Amino acid sequence: MLSIKNKIKVLICCIIFIFIIFIPNEVSANTDKPINNVFLISVDGLNYEGYVSMSTPNIDYFAQTGAFDEKAMAVRADTLEAGEASLLTGVFPNHHKHLTANDKVEVESLLDVLKKNQKSIMIVDGSGGKLKSFDHGHKKYIELDESASNKEVLDTLYDNFVKEKTFFNYAYLSGCKEALLKVDQDEYYEEWKDLDNQLAVFLKRLKDGGYYSKSLIILTSSRSSSPSDYVPLIIVGPNTKSNTKIEGSLIIDVAPTIASYIGLEKPYNSRGIALYNTYVVSEDTQKEVNSKWIEQLQQDRINNWVQYYKIADELDRTIRQLNSIKEEKESIFDFFGEKEQTIAKLKAQIWTERGIFAFVILVMGIGYLIEYKWLKRKFLLFK
């Protein structure tokens, strides 16, 4: 029979066991394996059609080691600043308002979330300084010329990462976009091949340095260079499913997904949803993951309705303004109609007065003529 002391020990152990089993932790992808670094590589000019038609063995192999979506929906943006801001904030350009390099990002970005949580940040800007607005002084910002090659950007990214050991590393490459703008299919193909080779070199350097296995690496493009609006999205890292093809992802999902993988809250007002279908989770935590996903989908549903109401209100205001303009236009037309009628009346009155005046002149002329003839006859009688 157990002593009172042993009974207390057993009771305490049971309480601890129950606490561990039934108290849920926040769902994130980094509960098993740590993520020491994050690499977000955005290549402007990518598209779904090029990805599936070009020969890119290294990128294909890289995708097979993680989760990938060949047809992630990109944002429609006229400028790279607007597209990259959507990638980093998880909202569309009409919300973040960062359309040119002179504009400010009006919503919280992933960089702001990282800053609040004391995470170091590095930006390698291969656009020639168009992403300078994301440099707030608390990050390492490296500006490269817009003509910088894929090798220059990726070498700069790796060399400075090794030196600084920054947690979040974001690089923008413009090579494919520049080749596409030249409307040269051969040059675009060569740019894809170069990207494929340089990415392989970059990943090998990460492996040789011992960083690859503990790094979350994402390769994508914020905007598509084809009318389909589709771009490839590849996610590789600790706790990421391997050789897994996903569907239905959006580029605005990237920022919330990164935040979830590293156990942080997604940027405030982000419209994206963490891609939980890329996670490796045990059966015990699958329900939690599903619940979290449902919760975010429900929140997104609410956000959609709120946005719908805003659009409906804006539409009502626009309709009222159009009706007001229509009424004002009709009023102006009525005024001009009345004006034309008044002018017509005045013209008629003038012509009437002229007619009367002409008639009076005619009568006077006839009178003078009669008087002249009468006087002439009278004077002739006295000759």
Image: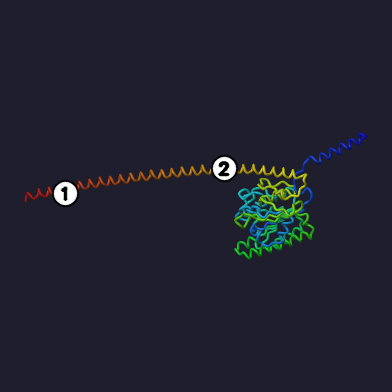
**Disc 2 marks which amino acid?**
Ala
Whether residue 144 is situated above or below residue 304 in the rendered picture: below
Task: Indicate the secondary structure of the residue bearing disc 2.
Answer: helix
Left or right: where 313 falls relative to 20: left
Where residue 2 appears, as percent x and y from the top left, is 92, 35
Residue tagged 2? 312
**Image quadrant in which you'd find residue 44:** bottom right
Where residue 371 appears, as percent x and y from the top left, is 15, 47
**Disc 1 marks which amino acid?**
Leu
Q: Quadrant of the N terminus?
A: top right
Do labels 2 and 1 touch, CB within 8 Å?
Answer: no
Q: Residue at x 91, y 34 (%)?
A: 4
Say the numbered circle drawn on residue 369.
Answer: 1
Q: Coloured how? A: rainbow
C-alpha span from label 2 to label 1: 84 Å
**Mark found first going from the N terminus, 2 or 1:** 2
Q: Nearer the viewer, residue 116 or 36?
A: 36
Task: Indicate the secondary structure of the residue bearing disc 1.
Answer: helix
Where residue 193 appears, as percent x and y from the top left, is 68, 63
